[in-house]
Image: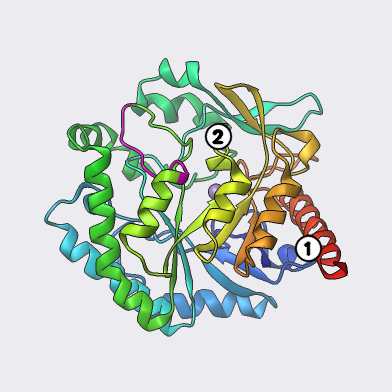
Amino acid sequence: MEMTLRWYGKDFDTVTLEQIRQIPGVKGVITTLYDTKPGEVWSRERIKAMKAEVEAAGLHVAGIESVNIHEDIKLGKPSREQLIDNYIETLTNLGEEDIHMVCYNFMPVFDWTRTELARKRPDGSTVLAYNQAAVDALVPEKMFDSIAGDTNGSLMPGWEPDRLAHVKELFDEYKDITDEDLFENLKYFLERIMPVCDKYDINMAIHPDDPAWPVFGLPRIIINKENIQRMMKMVDNPHNGVTFCSGSYGTNLENDLPDMIRSLKGRIHFAHVRNLKFNSKDDFEEAAHLSSDGSFDMYEIVKALYDIGFTGPIRPDHGRMIWGEKAMPGYGLYDRALGAAYINGLWEAIEKNAKRG
Ligand SMILES: [Mn+2]
């Protein structure tokens, strides 16, 4: 594995490349062109400039999170032809610039759902949290208003204003779309892009839906072992792979995370490792990465990744807001740096034990 940190670019992130460079063991960043819109072609020049900036700081671009998928592709509308052509052009430009991992998701309308962005924990840290009763009581298009005050001035990924302006229309368009339709539309997209992925050795890594069940009546398919195996088989190409995100699959306590990892040997191209603390089945909050602070056995998760021979980029995921830091919720420096150090420690111990036999 290669330890990385997500970085949104200097115009959007409170964390600098110089700070990331000083986290022990972090050599790469996972970044994006945060001001591009879904469906837009990423120019070779902009990708080259992004790479040069990261490399000037002594780091490298370990992959992209994300190249977002236009809703028309998920909906299977005729306009998807041009939009997929554009996506292929973006992949070509990334491949030409020697970038080989692209994270994306296929979630209708919302990238992710939380009901609080700054729930206070007993130690005074604040974290993102989810409560099902609060979601059930929400009108979807009002969700953003209800929590917008907690973003610390950041533009939250997946909640861009122009997307939000169309939430109501989007809900109408998804009214008759079933899980089966969504699988079909995903298959169509993947079959179109696989040739360019083969040509440039680009690993596509689908991020699970978060939370891992349908919200607001929208279809959601990347939620459990059965569905992800179906997706791997329906386009059986090693470049069709996954981002294994423990915090997203883990929202459903029925998902056995180490078992899922083992079942995806050779198809995990990127890993997000984080812990959640469940207060009940319907209420969870993001904990520190340390096993004892939450509900997951992080040792078993990292051990499963080690055992399948995972070599891709890995990153600590959302961190708590601690030590007075003001940053995009989940994406401060301090707690993610602690997470990276902890995961590195687990990996070192697992590796040394394995080599000792
Ligand atoms: Mn994730």
Residue 20 lies in the magenta-colored region = no
What is the crowding at mark 1: few (fewer than 14 residues within 10 Å), some, or many (at least 20)?
A: some
Q: Is residue 102 visible?
A: yes
Q: Which residues are magenta?
A: 217-225
Number of numbered callouts drawn: 2
In the picture of the structure, the residue carrying the numbered disc 1 is 23
Q: Relative to residue 308, is residue 297 drawn left or right?
A: right
Residue shown at 73% from the left, 46% from the top: 298
Mark 1 lies on a secondary structure that is loop
In the picture of the structure, the residue carrying the numbered disc 2 is 251
Q: Quadrant of residue 150?
A: top right
Position of residue 109 relative to residue 106, above or below, is above
Amino acid type of disc 1?
Ile
Camera-side residue of 132 and 36: 132
Report the Cα–Cα distance between label 1 and label 2.
Answer: 28 Å
Q: Relative to residue 77, is residue 338 drawn left or right?
A: right
Q: Quadrant of the N terminus?
A: bottom right
Residue 58 image offset from top left, x and y in percent: 70, 78
Q: Relative to residue 237, is residue 113 drawn left or right?
A: right
